[in-house]
Amino acid sequence: MTPETLDMTRIPQHIAIIMDGNGRWAKARGLNRSMGHQQGVVAVREITTACSNMGVKFLTLYTFSTENWNRPADEVAALMSLILTSLEEELFMKNNVRMRLIGDLSRVPEHVRSSILGLQERTAVNTGMTMVIALSYSARWEITHTMQQLAERVQTGELKPADIDEAMISSNLATAFMPDPDLLIRTGGEVRLSNYLLWQCAYSELYFCDTFWPDFHEEDLKRAISVYQQRERRYGKTSEQVTKV
């Protein structure tokens, strides 16, 4: 199977992406790191449009992690400014895309937070793909926050410890409104999840490539989906059990 022969009936319903390599892309060209992030925005627009056209239902982008707050202050400020200016309403409206936000928004500057939440509200009327922006997000933060909320409900007597199962945890995560990722893509050559959707990716198919995010185009996306379609998703079962009618 090649990118040109994708089975359009087996497109992943939820694709999550770790958009890595912006800074290294810029460094390789003798440019400031901020230029890499700006070029990465161009890739976001292309991939968002491609996913929408292919019928992907959810696209989740690791935009800024909780660990990214530890970067130099000038880079953090530049990233916040870029996030604010890059989420163009036209991109969502012309593709009929909804925008949702997940993460610890208490750390996000108020003007950035209010602007993005406003965009989330305005795009809620759209009926196509949902693009999820993971901003000031980490999986350990999300799981810890969820456990604290459930513990408070146990303390008040609303819940018993035995009531807490996998389904309850999933339904209280920040991602409760969408299915777990079918496919997780990481660009930039690193082979790790970097604290991203750890609970949700328990059975996701993982695809790693060396391409820096600014150079990741629609054909690269199709190649990742092609690899995904060649895999057998068993969820702990045998091949015979999966293929049995």
Image (cartoon, rainbow, N blue to C red):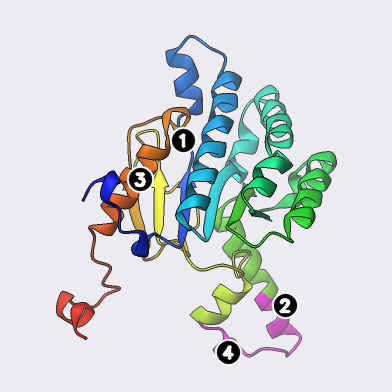
User: Magenta segment: does it hold 18?
Assistant: no
Amino acid type at circle 2 is Glu
Q: Against 173, is 205 above or below?
A: above
Q: Mark 1 or mark 4, which has the lower sequence index? A: 1
Q: CA distance from mark 4 to mark 3?
A: 42 Å
Distance of label 2 from label 1 (alpha carbons) = 37 Å
Q: Which residues are magenta?
A: 150-165
Between discs 2 and 4, the one toward the N terminus:
2
* Residue drawn at point x = 83 percent, y = 47 percent: 114
Give the mark toward the camera: 1 or 3.
3
Query: Which disc number belongs to residue 20?
Result: 1
Is 91 in front, or is 170? 91
User: Distance of mark 3 from mark 2, alpha carbons?
Assistant: 45 Å
Q: Residues within 10 Å of mark 1 (few under 14, many from 20)?
A: many
In the image, which is nearer the foreground, mark 2 or mark 4?
4
The amino acid pointed to by label 4 is: Asp
Which residue in the structure is indicated by mark 3?
222
Residue 102 appearing in the image: no
Q: Earlier in the sequence, mark 1 or mark 3?
A: 1
Q: Nearer the viewer, mark 2 or mark 1?
A: 1
Q: Who comes first in sequence, dot 3 or dot 2?
A: 2
Mark toward the start of the polypeptide (2 vs 1)? 1
The residue pinned by badge 2 equals 152
Q: What residue is rendered at 39% in x and 56% in y?
A: 183
Residue 241 placement, left or right of 54: left
**Residue flagged by tag 3: what amino acid is it?**
Lys
Picture coordinates of residue 66, whole percent (x, y): 62, 45
Callout 2 crowding tier (Cα within 10 Å): few <14, some 14–19, many ≥20 = few
> Marks 1/4: CA distance?
39 Å
Query: In what quadrant of the picture does the C terminus appear?
Result: bottom left
The residue that mark 4 highlights is 163
Q: Please, which residue is most extreme toward the left here?
A: 240
